Every structure is written in C-alpha cells, then in structure tokens.
C-alpha cells in the first residue's frame, strides 16, 4: 500500500522533517532525542500543536518536539514510521555512526597494508604516506573508493621491484594491479596518487603540472605512458645488424649526425649496437659540441637529457649485452650522483670524470649554483658526495665541455 504523504510536503512539515532526518542520520536512527525549530512559522506551530496536543502561543521563539512523539503521530495518521516516511519523501537515510565505524576500519586496514609493504622502510614512502594523512587525502580516498590506496601501494611496489631498463607500459601495469587498463590514465585519481609518491621519491618539490613532465616522471621509474614520446639522443652509435632502424643509425654515424631514437623504434628488435666504448653524458650541449667539433670521428656518445628515459635504458642495455663498455657521467649535483650510481648498478657503467678531483676542478673553472635536493652518496668515490655536501654547490656538465671534448677526441683517435 502506497501512503498519501502529500500533507508532509506542506510548509508546516518541511523544516520539522529535515531536522528529524539530520537527527536520525547523526545518531543512527535513535528516537530518544528531541528536535527544535527556531522562529517557527504559524504553519509549523500548528503542526507541532497537532502532534503534541499542547498549545504554543504565536510569540513562542522555539518549538521542541520529541522524535518518539513525531514517530507515533505519523504511525497514527499515515500508518508509517518516521524512518520510512523520511525515506519515501527524500530517499535513504545515512547511518553516520556506521559510516564512521566503517571508515575507521578502512583506515586501519589501509595503514596496516602500508605498514606491511616492502616499501615501508623507504623514507620517501613514509613521507608520501604522511603527506596523504596530513592533508586529508586518505580520508577522502577511503570515502570515495576504499581500494585506491591499496592499488597505489601495489603500483609503487611493482615499479620498485622491476629491474631497471625493463619498462612496462602504463595500461599493462594498470591492468595487472587493478584489472582496469585505464586506471593510470593522466588525471585519473590513481595516477595522481602514484605520481605524488614518485615525485617525492625523485626529490621533486611537486608533481609536474604538464603532461610532458608527468610522462618523464613515469619514465624515470620504468613506466611508459607513450613509447613514441620516450626518446634518446645519440651520436655515432653504429649497429652491426641489418634492419631499417639500424640502417638509419649507421647512416647517421657515418656522417657524424646526431640522431633521436624512440622506444617504439627500439622495440623493433633490430637495434644491436656494435661492441664499443660508449660515452654517456647528461646535457645535450655536450653532444651538440661533440658533433660540431669531432663529427664522425667522435666515439659513440649517448645523451640522457636529464634522468635517463626508458628508451635510453633499452638502447644501452642492448649495447652492454653486445659487449659495449659504458663510460657515464652527469651533473655534479645530488641527482647526477643518483644517475651515475644507478647506471653502475644497472649497466655496469664506469664513472666518467666523476671524481672528487674533477669536481674541485669544475668549481675552480666553472660557474656553480646552490646545491639543492636530498643528499645521496657516491659509492664509486665516497669523497665526492662528501665534497658536494661541504661546498654546497652544484656544477652543471656543460661547464666541463672542453675537458670532455679532450677525452672524446683522444678516444676518437
């Protein structure tokens, strides 16, 4: 039977029932409370008089009524409880105490999941989690989707466990962790959450706002949003195997012309660099001057253009597999030390002009800038990291071009 609740939609009932809804939602449906209306209208005063049977003068400033009395009146007049009437008039009631309890359980489960993660001992992971708690993100995410945090931790664990130089496309990563290939699309809640962690891990002040910066951040951690956008700049890297891309590299090498390779091109499988001494720099200015001054006589030179891309790792990994020896350098700053340290671990690279003596020389002959970011070590020469910390100055690689060209010219001869 459908009750006729037209009366309850009238002016005298609206505020009364709204107050009753707020009270029931706040207490989980308890009827042992009272509600009140300030500055009641005549219509509201008449409704309350009708429910309670007690006269209230027109001058009354506030009306109070027991919820139990309101419930009894509705049962008598409309054969429905207060709870059911509110649902029929305005939709389901929230049970806020139950919601809070569920949220607390979810928060405890999320905290337990994070504490049990293999990343729990990582400082950047702890900083990320603390930041999420401090700005209320954890609470908002649990209210929206109780699995977002779990998935974010899963993505970070997966990226952390991968061997460098073996990138994974974002749709594949998203499907493996969430079952949804689109979960890590740019702007998606999960992608935003993971990028916050990766930015902290990479010692960035914040997540890059532009898509290019975000793509580079993914690539720094071996996740590939776009295999065409992931590139590596090379000079005189020749291949001993036939093929379309190998042919391009060989032609460019014979002419001493810089060449850009994409990850998609490298995925063709025909790029197998000849075993040689390959030099790796960070700044494209070094490669540009080398191409101009040495041309085809320059030994193979690869430029990472900052943190190495997935394309860079794939090319150099293939080169090492063919017997190449890598001589690697970067800027004299904390990020540069991390890049070289990772190259030694991942590719067995040899540091190139990355000693404490080279840093002292760079300070004496080149312009320096304040050293920023989180300190790290230099396992190949502990004194280098200590010297950077002592001086607090960074020296960009292009300040050493003359010295680096001398090395390259010698190798070229």
Image: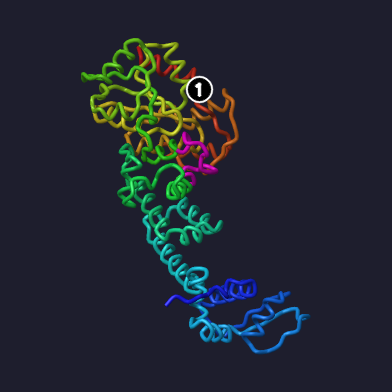
Magenta-colored span? 199-214
Q: Quadrant of residue 64?
A: bottom right
Q: Is residue 100 left or right of residue 313?
A: right
Judge whether 359 appears above or below 244 on screen: below
Q: Tell me residue 304's x, y (percent).
A: 41, 28
| Tag 1 residue | 400
Q: Residue at x 35, y 10 (%)?
A: 255
Q: Residue at x 39, y 54 (%)?
A: 153
Q: Residue at x 46, y 38 (%)?
A: 214
Judge whether 156 appears above or below 50 on screen: above
Q: Secondary structure at mark 1?
A: helix
| Pick the front one: 393 or 289 | 289
Q: Tell me residue 104's x, y (percent).
A: 47, 69
Q: Residue at x 52, y 28 (%)?
A: 396
Furthest-left residue in this view = 242
| Pick the front one: 51 or 135 | 51
């Amino acid at each position: 039977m459908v009750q006729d609740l037209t009366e309850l939609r009238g002016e005298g009932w609206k505020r009364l029932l709204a107050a009753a809804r707020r009270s029931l939602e706040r207490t989980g449906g308890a009827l042992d409370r009272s509600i009140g209306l300030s500055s009641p209208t005549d219509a509201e005063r008449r409704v309350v008089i009708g429910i309670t049977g007690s006269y209230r003068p027109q001058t009354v400033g506030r009306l109070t009524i027991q919820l139990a009395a309101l419930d009894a009146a509705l049962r008598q007049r409309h054969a429905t409880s207060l709870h059911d009437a509110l649902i029929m008039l305005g939709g389901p009631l929230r049970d806020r105490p139950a919601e809070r309890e569920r949220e607390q359980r979810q928060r405890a489960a999320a905290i337990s999941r994070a504490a049990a993660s293999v990343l729990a001992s990582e400082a950047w992971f702890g900083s990320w989690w603390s930041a999420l708690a401090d700005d209320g993100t954890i609470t908002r995410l649990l209210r929206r989707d109780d699995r977002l945090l779990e998935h974010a931790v899963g993505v970070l664990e997966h990226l952390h466990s991968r061997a460098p130089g073996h990138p994974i496309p974002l749709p594949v990563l998203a499907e493996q962790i969430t079952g949804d290939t689109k979960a890590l699309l740019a702007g998606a809640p999960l992608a935003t959450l993971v990028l916050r962690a990766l930015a902290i891990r990479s010692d960035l002040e914040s997540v890059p706002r532009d898509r290019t910066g975000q793509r580079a951040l993914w690539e720094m951690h071996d996740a590939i949003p776009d295999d065409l956008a992931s590139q590596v700049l090379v000079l005189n890297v020749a291949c001993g195997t036939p093929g379309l891309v190998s042919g391009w590299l060989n032609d460019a090498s014979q002419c001493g012309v810089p060449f850009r390779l994409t990850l998609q091109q490298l995925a063709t499988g025909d790029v197998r660099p000849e075993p040689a001494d390959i030099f790796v720099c960070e700044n494209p200015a070094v490669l540009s001057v080398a191409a101009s001054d040495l041309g085809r006589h320059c030994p193979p030179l690869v430029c990472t253009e900052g943190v190495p891309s997935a394309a860079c790792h794939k090319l150099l990994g293939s080169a090492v597999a063919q017997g190449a020896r890598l001589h690697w350098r970067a800027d004299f700053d904390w990020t540069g030390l991390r890049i070289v340290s990772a190259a030694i671990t991942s590719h067995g690279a040899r540091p190139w002009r990355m000693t404490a003596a080279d840093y002292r020389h760079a300070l004496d002959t080149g312009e320096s800038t304040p050293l920023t970011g989180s300190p790290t070590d230099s396992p190949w020469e502990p004194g280098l990291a200590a010297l950077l910390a002592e001086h607090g100055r960074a020296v960009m690689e292009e300040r050493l071009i003359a010295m680096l060209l001398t090395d390259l010219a010698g190798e070229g001869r």
